[in-house]
Amino acid sequence: MCLSFSPSGEVLATGSMDNTARLWDVHAGQESAVLSGHSAEIVSLSFDRKGHSIITGSFDNTVKLWDVRTGECAMTFTGHRGEISTTQFNFEGNQCISGSIDRTCKMWDLRKGACVQTMRGHHDEVLDVSYNYSGTRVRNVAVCGLHSLRRC
């Protein structure tokens, strides 16, 4: 369903319809960890810029934060009323954003483990989200087209 390389290029993460994400050692060509905990398929995943953490978004309406080194789930974020379609860390790695078919984006503070902002006003499902390089602005795309640029 989805895949992403770590910033170093040494780990490949894959999200699957079997409700797991898997980490692969690119050099050895072998699976190094299975991230289990979602109750529906994983359709989005993203590494932080250091490659130490990964976030996954699932059709179970949750976002999970994982420790890449241990394969353990560090946090689960709930609050969307529909399937997650996209996730991304900010550059600092202290926040992430998720987009959903519920027509919202949610910004999550990873230190507090809480939603700090919900962006509403989309006329259809949110397909993609992106922070700018400095992490001060967010852009999101819904089925109806490009949505407004927002300050974080």
Image (tube, rainbow, N blue to C red):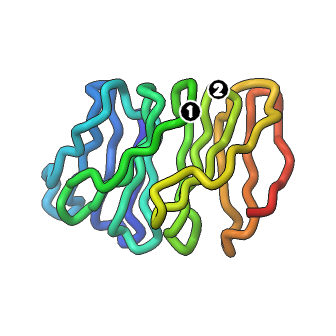
- Quadrant (top left/top right/bottom left/bottom right) for the N terminus: top left
Residue indicated by mark 1: 80
Residue indicated by mark 2: 102
Picture quadrant of residue 27: bottom left
Q: Secondary structure at mark 2?
A: loop
The percent position of residue 80, horizontal first and vertical second, equals 56, 32
Name above or below for residue 149 compared with residue 35.
below
Going by the numbered disc 1, the residue's amino acid type is His
Please tell me which residue is depicted at 54% across the width and 60% down the height of the picture. Answer: 109
Q: Secondary structure at mark 1?
A: loop
Please tell me which residue is depicted at 29% across the width and 29% down the height of the picture. Answer: 19
Q: What mark, if any, has residue 99 been given in the picture?
A: none
The percent position of residue 73, horizontal first and vertical second, equals 27, 51
Q: Are marks 2 and 1 in contact (CB under 8 Å)?
A: yes
Please tell me which residue is depicted at 20% across the width and 55% down the height of the picture. Answer: 71
- 50, 38: nearer the viewer: 38
Query: How dense is the environment of label 1, judged by Cα within 10 Å: few (below 14), some, or many (20 and up)?
Result: many
Query: How dense is the environment of label 2, judged by Cα within 10 Å: few (below 14), some, or many (20 and up)?
Result: some
Name above or below for residue 23 compared with residue 104.
below
Choose the circle earlier in sequence order: 2 or 1.
1
Please tell me which residue is depicted at 44% across the width and 36% down the height of the picture. Answer: 62
Going by the numbered disc 2, the residue's amino acid type is Asp
